[in-house]
Protein backbone atom coordinates (compact mmCIF):
# COMPACT_ATOMS: atom_id res chain seq x y z
CA UNK A 1 0.00 0.00 0.00
CA UNK A 2 2.81 2.40 0.93
CA UNK A 3 4.48 1.68 -2.44
CA UNK A 4 1.23 2.41 -4.29
CA UNK A 5 0.78 5.68 -2.40
CA UNK A 6 4.34 6.79 -3.21
CA UNK A 7 3.89 5.87 -6.88
CA UNK A 8 0.59 7.75 -7.05
CA UNK A 9 2.16 10.81 -5.44
CA UNK A 10 5.05 10.74 -7.93
CA UNK A 11 2.65 10.44 -10.84
CA UNK A 12 0.57 13.34 -9.53
CA UNK A 13 3.71 15.44 -9.10
CA UNK A 14 4.69 14.77 -12.70
CA UNK A 15 1.29 15.99 -13.92
CA UNK A 16 1.51 19.09 -11.76
CA UNK A 17 5.12 20.09 -12.35
CA UNK A 18 5.25 19.27 -16.09
CA UNK A 19 3.02 22.17 -17.20
CA UNK A 20 4.57 24.44 -14.58
CA UNK A 21 8.06 23.77 -15.93
CA UNK A 22 6.85 24.45 -19.48
CA UNK A 23 5.30 27.71 -18.35
CA UNK A 24 8.53 28.76 -16.65
CA UNK A 25 10.61 28.61 -19.84
CA UNK A 26 13.15 30.14 -20.10
CA UNK A 27 14.79 29.13 -16.85
CA UNK A 28 18.35 29.94 -17.98
CA UNK A 29 20.16 32.18 -20.53
CA UNK A 30 19.59 31.69 -24.26
CA UNK A 31 22.61 31.29 -26.55
CA UNK A 32 22.35 33.19 -29.84
CA UNK A 33 24.97 31.74 -32.19
CA UNK A 34 26.39 34.04 -34.90
CA UNK A 35 27.97 32.33 -37.94
CA UNK A 36 30.57 35.08 -38.46
CA UNK A 37 33.14 37.01 -36.39
CA UNK A 38 32.28 40.11 -34.34
CA UNK A 39 31.74 43.36 -36.20
CA UNK A 40 29.77 42.11 -39.20
CA UNK A 41 26.05 42.67 -39.80
CA UNK A 42 24.86 39.33 -38.28
CA UNK A 43 26.85 40.14 -35.13
CA UNK A 44 25.51 43.71 -34.97
CA UNK A 45 21.92 42.48 -35.29
CA UNK A 46 22.39 39.65 -32.79
CA UNK A 47 23.70 42.00 -30.11
CA UNK A 48 21.13 44.70 -30.81
CA UNK A 49 18.10 42.40 -30.80
CA UNK A 50 19.44 39.96 -28.22
CA UNK A 51 19.83 42.68 -25.63
CA UNK A 52 16.24 43.87 -26.15
CA UNK A 53 14.73 40.35 -26.43
CA UNK A 54 16.38 39.46 -23.10
CA UNK A 55 14.08 41.95 -21.38
CA UNK A 56 11.01 40.27 -22.83
CA UNK A 57 12.28 36.78 -21.99
CA UNK A 58 13.49 37.60 -18.49
CA UNK A 59 16.80 35.85 -19.23
CA UNK A 60 20.10 36.96 -20.73
CA UNK A 61 20.69 36.35 -24.44
CA UNK A 62 24.37 35.47 -24.87
CA UNK A 63 25.92 36.06 -28.31
CA UNK A 64 28.31 33.27 -29.35
CA UNK A 65 30.38 33.91 -32.51
CA UNK A 66 31.22 30.64 -34.31
CA UNK A 67 32.69 31.51 -37.74
CA UNK A 68 33.84 28.99 -40.30
CA UNK A 69 32.94 27.33 -43.62
CA UNK A 70 30.75 30.18 -44.83
CA UNK A 71 28.58 29.95 -41.72
CA UNK A 72 28.10 26.18 -41.89
CA UNK A 73 30.01 25.57 -38.65
CA UNK A 74 27.51 27.60 -36.63
CA UNK A 75 24.52 26.15 -38.45
CA UNK A 76 25.65 22.59 -37.70
CA UNK A 77 26.21 23.45 -34.03
CA UNK A 78 22.65 24.69 -33.71
CA UNK A 79 21.15 21.90 -35.82
CA UNK A 80 22.72 19.34 -33.45
CA UNK A 81 21.89 21.17 -30.23
CA UNK A 82 19.07 20.12 -27.90
CA UNK A 83 15.64 21.20 -29.19
CA UNK A 84 14.80 23.06 -25.98
CA UNK A 85 14.91 26.66 -27.24
CA UNK A 86 18.08 27.55 -25.36
CA UNK A 87 20.22 27.63 -28.53
CA UNK A 88 19.25 29.69 -31.59
CA UNK A 89 21.15 31.10 -34.55
CA UNK A 90 21.21 34.38 -36.48
CA UNK A 91 20.80 32.96 -39.96
CA UNK A 92 21.61 34.82 -43.16
CA UNK A 93 20.70 34.57 -46.83
CA UNK A 94 24.04 32.83 -47.21
CA UNK A 95 23.66 30.20 -44.49
CA UNK A 96 20.00 29.52 -45.25
CA UNK A 97 19.47 29.98 -49.00
CA UNK A 98 22.85 30.09 -50.79
CA UNK A 99 24.96 27.44 -49.06
CA UNK A 100 22.62 24.52 -49.82
CA UNK A 101 23.46 24.99 -53.51
CA UNK A 102 27.08 26.10 -53.08
CA UNK A 103 28.29 23.32 -50.78
CA UNK A 104 28.04 19.63 -51.53
CA UNK A 105 27.05 17.19 -48.76
CA UNK A 106 26.14 19.65 -46.00
CA UNK A 107 25.77 17.78 -42.68
CA UNK A 108 22.37 19.39 -42.12
CA UNK A 109 19.29 20.53 -44.01
CA UNK A 110 18.02 24.03 -43.33
CA UNK A 111 14.42 23.12 -44.08
CA UNK A 112 14.53 19.79 -42.20
CA UNK A 113 16.74 20.57 -39.19
CA UNK A 114 15.62 24.11 -38.29
CA UNK A 115 12.49 25.84 -37.07
CA UNK A 116 12.41 29.46 -38.33
CA UNK A 117 11.57 31.89 -35.53
CA UNK A 118 11.43 35.32 -37.18
CA UNK A 119 12.77 37.25 -40.18
CA UNK A 120 14.71 40.24 -38.86
CA UNK A 121 14.94 42.20 -42.10
CA UNK A 122 16.87 42.88 -45.29
CA UNK A 123 19.60 45.21 -46.44
CA UNK A 124 21.67 46.06 -49.51
CA UNK A 125 25.31 45.40 -50.18
CA UNK A 126 27.51 48.33 -51.09
CA UNK A 127 30.09 48.08 -53.86
CA UNK A 128 33.15 49.91 -52.56
CA UNK A 129 36.74 50.21 -53.79
CA UNK A 130 40.03 51.23 -52.20
CA UNK A 131 40.81 54.92 -52.90
CA UNK A 132 43.84 53.87 -54.94
CA UNK A 133 41.59 52.21 -57.54
CA UNK A 134 41.19 54.73 -60.41
CA UNK A 135 37.44 54.35 -60.78
CA UNK A 136 34.67 56.62 -59.54
CA UNK A 137 31.77 54.75 -61.15
CA UNK A 138 30.77 51.20 -61.99
CA UNK A 139 31.36 51.95 -65.66
CA UNK A 140 34.95 53.04 -64.95
CA UNK A 141 35.53 50.00 -62.74
CA UNK A 142 34.36 47.65 -65.52
CA UNK A 143 36.62 49.39 -68.03
CA UNK A 144 39.56 49.06 -65.65
CA UNK A 145 38.86 45.38 -65.02
CA UNK A 146 38.64 44.68 -68.76
CA UNK A 147 41.93 46.47 -69.34
CA UNK A 148 43.63 44.55 -66.51
CA UNK A 149 42.17 41.01 -66.46
CA UNK A 150 42.84 39.01 -63.29
CA UNK A 151 44.59 41.91 -61.55
CA UNK A 152 41.65 43.35 -59.58
CA UNK A 153 40.74 41.43 -56.43
CA UNK A 154 37.44 41.40 -54.56
CA UNK A 155 37.16 40.39 -50.91
CA UNK A 156 34.30 38.46 -49.34
CA UNK A 157 33.35 37.12 -45.94
CA UNK A 158 33.80 33.59 -47.24
CA UNK A 159 32.53 31.16 -49.85
CA UNK A 160 28.74 31.15 -49.93
CA UNK A 161 28.28 34.57 -48.34
CA UNK A 162 26.16 37.22 -50.03
CA UNK A 163 29.42 39.16 -50.50
CA UNK A 164 30.86 36.27 -52.50
CA UNK A 165 27.73 35.74 -54.60
CA UNK A 166 27.38 39.50 -55.27
CA UNK A 167 30.95 39.55 -56.60
CA UNK A 168 30.34 36.54 -58.81
CA UNK A 169 27.08 37.99 -60.14
CA UNK A 170 28.90 41.21 -61.02
CA UNK A 171 31.81 39.31 -62.58
CA UNK A 172 29.42 37.40 -64.80
CA UNK A 173 27.15 40.33 -65.68
CA UNK A 174 30.04 42.63 -66.61
CA UNK A 175 32.11 39.81 -68.16
CA UNK A 176 35.19 40.82 -66.19
CA UNK A 177 37.84 38.53 -64.73
CA UNK A 178 38.15 39.40 -61.02
CA UNK A 179 40.06 37.37 -58.44
CA UNK A 180 38.05 36.28 -55.39
CA UNK A 181 39.81 36.53 -52.01
CA UNK A 182 37.68 34.86 -49.27
CA UNK A 183 38.01 35.71 -45.57
CA UNK A 184 36.43 34.32 -42.39
CA UNK A 185 34.07 37.26 -41.99
CA UNK A 186 33.41 40.70 -43.44
CA UNK A 187 35.49 42.58 -40.86
CA UNK A 188 38.86 41.00 -41.77
CA UNK A 189 37.93 41.38 -45.45
CA UNK A 190 37.10 45.04 -44.95
CA UNK A 191 40.29 45.67 -42.98
CA UNK A 192 42.36 44.32 -45.87
CA UNK A 193 40.42 46.53 -48.28
CA UNK A 194 41.19 49.57 -46.14
CA UNK A 195 44.84 48.51 -46.04
CA UNK A 196 44.91 48.21 -49.82
CA UNK A 197 45.55 44.45 -49.81
CA UNK A 198 42.46 43.93 -52.00
CA UNK A 199 40.77 46.27 -54.47
CA UNK A 200 37.03 46.06 -53.91
CA UNK A 201 34.23 44.52 -51.90
CA UNK A 202 30.47 44.02 -51.94
CA UNK A 203 29.86 44.46 -48.22
CA UNK A 204 26.74 44.81 -46.08
CA UNK A 205 25.91 48.42 -45.37
CA UNK A 206 26.36 48.31 -41.56
CA UNK A 207 29.88 46.88 -41.85
CA UNK A 208 31.23 49.16 -44.56
CA UNK A 209 29.38 52.35 -43.59
CA UNK A 210 31.94 53.63 -41.02
CA UNK A 211 34.76 53.18 -43.54
CA UNK A 212 32.86 55.10 -46.19
CA UNK A 213 32.10 57.90 -43.75
CA UNK A 214 35.77 58.05 -42.77
CA UNK A 215 36.83 58.28 -46.42
CA UNK A 216 38.81 55.05 -46.23
CA UNK A 217 36.88 53.38 -49.07
CA UNK A 218 34.99 54.81 -52.06
CA UNK A 219 31.37 53.68 -52.67
CA UNK A 220 30.23 53.13 -56.25
CA UNK A 221 26.78 51.49 -56.11
CA UNK A 222 24.28 49.49 -54.04
CA UNK A 223 23.02 46.00 -54.86
CA UNK A 224 19.44 46.48 -53.68
CA UNK A 225 16.33 47.09 -55.74
CA UNK A 226 16.23 50.75 -54.70
CA UNK A 227 18.71 53.43 -53.73
CA UNK A 228 20.01 53.68 -50.19
CA UNK A 229 18.51 56.25 -47.84
CA UNK A 230 22.03 56.89 -46.59
CA UNK A 231 23.56 57.40 -50.05
CA UNK A 232 20.76 58.63 -52.31
CA UNK A 233 23.29 59.78 -54.89
CA UNK A 234 24.63 56.27 -55.46
CA UNK A 235 23.03 54.25 -58.27
CA UNK A 236 21.75 50.73 -57.87
CA UNK A 237 23.56 48.03 -59.83
CA UNK A 238 20.52 47.94 -62.14
CA UNK A 239 20.80 51.68 -62.76
CA UNK A 240 24.52 51.23 -63.41
CA UNK A 241 23.63 48.76 -66.17
CA UNK A 242 23.94 45.42 -64.37
CA UNK A 243 20.55 44.31 -63.02
CA UNK A 244 21.80 40.73 -62.86
CA UNK A 245 24.17 41.80 -60.07
CA UNK A 246 21.35 42.77 -57.70
CA UNK A 247 21.04 41.00 -54.34
CA UNK A 248 19.39 42.02 -51.06
CA UNK A 249 20.81 40.04 -48.10
CA UNK A 250 18.43 39.18 -45.25
CA UNK A 251 18.77 37.89 -41.69
CA UNK A 252 16.59 35.92 -39.31
CA UNK A 253 16.52 33.87 -36.13
CA UNK A 254 16.19 30.08 -36.29
CA UNK A 255 15.97 27.35 -33.64
CA UNK A 256 16.63 23.62 -33.98
CA UNK A 257 13.78 21.55 -35.36
CA UNK A 258 11.43 19.94 -32.83
CA UNK A 259 11.56 22.83 -30.36
CA UNK A 260 8.13 22.78 -28.65
CA UNK A 261 5.54 25.09 -30.16
CA UNK A 262 4.96 27.14 -26.99
CA UNK A 263 8.72 27.80 -26.71
CA UNK A 264 8.93 28.89 -30.36
CA UNK A 265 5.96 31.20 -29.76
CA UNK A 266 7.77 32.83 -26.83
CA UNK A 267 10.93 33.28 -28.87
CA UNK A 268 8.95 34.77 -31.74
CA UNK A 269 7.10 37.16 -29.43
CA UNK A 270 10.32 38.28 -27.74
CA UNK A 271 12.21 39.00 -30.97
CA UNK A 272 9.19 40.71 -32.54
CA UNK A 273 8.93 42.89 -29.45
CA UNK A 274 12.63 43.69 -29.73
CA UNK A 275 12.23 44.64 -33.39
CA UNK A 276 9.38 47.05 -32.56
CA UNK A 277 11.39 48.86 -29.88
CA UNK A 278 11.85 52.55 -30.91
CA UNK A 279 15.55 52.50 -30.02
CA UNK A 280 16.08 49.38 -32.13
CA UNK A 281 14.09 50.89 -35.01
CA UNK A 282 16.25 54.01 -34.85
CA UNK A 283 19.47 52.00 -34.95
CA UNK A 284 18.23 49.88 -37.88
CA UNK A 285 17.38 53.05 -39.82
CA UNK A 286 20.91 54.31 -39.18
CA UNK A 287 22.37 51.23 -40.90
CA UNK A 288 19.72 51.23 -43.64
CA UNK A 289 18.20 47.87 -42.70
CA UNK A 290 14.54 47.32 -43.56
CA UNK A 291 12.92 45.55 -40.57
CA UNK A 292 10.50 42.68 -41.16
CA UNK A 293 9.26 40.65 -38.18
CA UNK A 294 6.23 38.39 -38.44
CA UNK A 295 5.69 34.69 -37.89
CA UNK A 296 7.97 31.71 -38.15
CA UNK A 297 5.78 30.34 -40.95
CA UNK A 298 6.32 33.50 -42.99
CA UNK A 299 10.07 33.21 -42.52
CA UNK A 300 9.98 29.53 -43.51
CA UNK A 301 8.15 30.43 -46.75
CA UNK A 302 10.82 33.05 -47.56
CA UNK A 303 13.64 30.57 -46.96
CA UNK A 304 12.01 28.03 -49.29
CA UNK A 305 11.42 30.60 -52.04
CA UNK A 306 14.91 32.12 -51.77
CA UNK A 307 16.59 28.69 -51.72
CA UNK A 308 14.81 27.80 -54.95
CA UNK A 309 15.56 31.19 -56.57
CA UNK A 310 19.25 31.34 -55.71
CA UNK A 311 19.74 27.65 -56.38
CA UNK A 312 18.76 28.28 -60.01
CA UNK A 313 21.04 31.33 -60.24
CA UNK A 314 24.01 29.51 -58.71
CA UNK A 315 23.62 26.57 -61.08
CA UNK A 316 23.16 28.80 -64.15
CA UNK A 317 26.16 30.99 -63.29
CA UNK A 318 28.35 28.08 -62.23
CA UNK A 319 29.12 29.66 -58.85
CA UNK A 320 30.73 27.25 -56.40
CA UNK A 321 32.43 27.08 -53.05
CA UNK A 322 36.01 25.86 -53.39
Image (cartoon, rainbow, N blue to C red):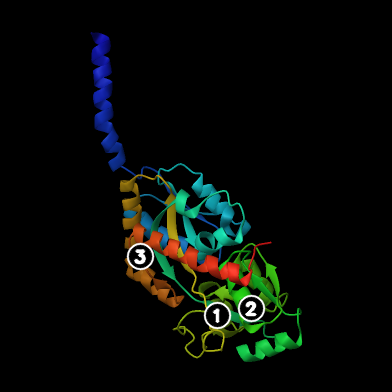
- Mark 2: which secondary structure? helix
Q: Quadrant of residue 27?
A: top left
Query: What is the x, y in percent for residue 153?
Result: 71, 76
Whether the residues at callouts 3 and 1 have beta carbons within 8 Å, the answer is no
Disc count in the image?
A: 3
Query: What is the x, y in percent for residue 238?
Result: 52, 85
- Quadrant including the N terminus: top left
Q: Is residue 216 visible?
A: no
Residue 305 placement, left or right of 65 = left
Which of marks 3 and 2 precedes in the sequence? 2
Q: Name the residue: 24% across, 19% down.
A: 8
Which of marks 1 and 3 precedes in the sequence? 1
Which of marks 1 and 2 precedes in the sequence? 2
The numbered dot on residue 293 is 3
Residue 277 placement, left or right of 211 = left
Residue 208 placement, left or right of 15 = right
User: Neighbour class for label 2 at 10 Å: few (<14), some, many (≥20)?
Assistant: some
Whether the residues at callouts 2 and 1 have beta carbons within 8 Å, the answer is yes
| Residue situated in front as seen by the camera: 280 or 319 | 319
The numbered dot on residue 172 is 2
Q: CA distance from mark 3 to mark 1?
A: 28 Å
Q: CA distance from mark 2 to mark 3?
A: 34 Å
Q: Which residue is mark 1?
A: 244
Residue 273 placement, left or right of 300 = left
Depth check, mark 2 against mark 3: the one in front is 2
- Mark 1: which secondary structure? helix
User: Neighbour class for label 3 at 10 Å: few (<14), some, many (≥20)?
Assistant: many
Image height check: is 286 above or below 301? below
Amino acid sequence: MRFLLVAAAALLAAFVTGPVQAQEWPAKPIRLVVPFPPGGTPDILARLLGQRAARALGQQVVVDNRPGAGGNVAMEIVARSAPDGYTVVMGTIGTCALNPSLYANLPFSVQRDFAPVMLVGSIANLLAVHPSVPATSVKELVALAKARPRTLTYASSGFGSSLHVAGELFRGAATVDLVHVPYKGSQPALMDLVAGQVNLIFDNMPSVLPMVQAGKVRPLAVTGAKRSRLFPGLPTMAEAGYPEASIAPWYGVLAPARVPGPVLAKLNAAFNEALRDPAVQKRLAEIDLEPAGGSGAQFAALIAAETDKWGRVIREKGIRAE
